[in-house]
Image (spheres, grey):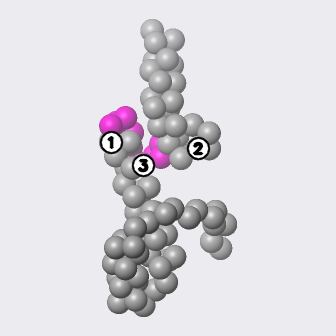
Amino acid sequence: MSLPLKDFRPGITERTHRVLSRIARARGITLQELGREIIEAYVAKAIHDAKVILGQDDGHADELESAGRAPEDAGANRNASARGRR
């Protein structure tokens, strides 16, 4: 079962469109599928980078991916909790 998709239509230049179209055609996928792969890879890297910066391991990945909380909020809450335990 796949997750529901949200509509997102960024404007791109003609040059970028030509290049992405050729890449998609060479791979046998649609331009939309290629765009989704690019965005998902970017988001996965951003989440990984945030976890590295915050010193979190994979056991706490849900803290960054939980709805409504930005990665910087997660770090601020963790620091506040640590101060309260002293």
- Residue pointed to by mark 1: 52
Q: How many marks?
A: 3
Is residue 21 among the parts visible in the rendering? yes
Given residues 3 and 62, the one toward you in this image is 3
- Residue 43 on the magenta span: no
Image x and y of residue 75, in percent: 45, 29
Q: Which amino acid type is shown beneath numbered disc 1?
A: Val
Judged from the image, the secondary structure of the residue bearing numbered disc 3 is helix
Specify the farthest residue to the top: 86
Say if 75 sits above or below 67 in the image: above
Mark 3 → mark 1, Cα distance in angstroms: 9 Å
Magenta segment, prevailing SS (helix, strand or loop) = helix
- Residue pointed to by mark 3: 47
Given residues 62 and 10, the one toward you in this image is 10
Judged from the image, the secondary structure of the residue bearing numbered disc 2 is loop
Judged from the image, the secondary structure of the residue bearing numbered disc 1 is helix
Say if 54 sits above or below 33 in the image: above
The quadrant in which the C terminus is found is top left
Task: Estimate how packed mark 3 is, as few (under 14), some (14 to 19) or many (20 or more) residues with alpha carbons within 10 Å.
Answer: some
Image x and y of residue 17, in percent: 40, 75
Name the N-terminal-most of marks 2 and 3. Answer: 3
Assess whether mark 1 and mark 3 are in contact (beta carbons under 8 angstroms): no
Q: Which residues are magenta?
A: 53-61
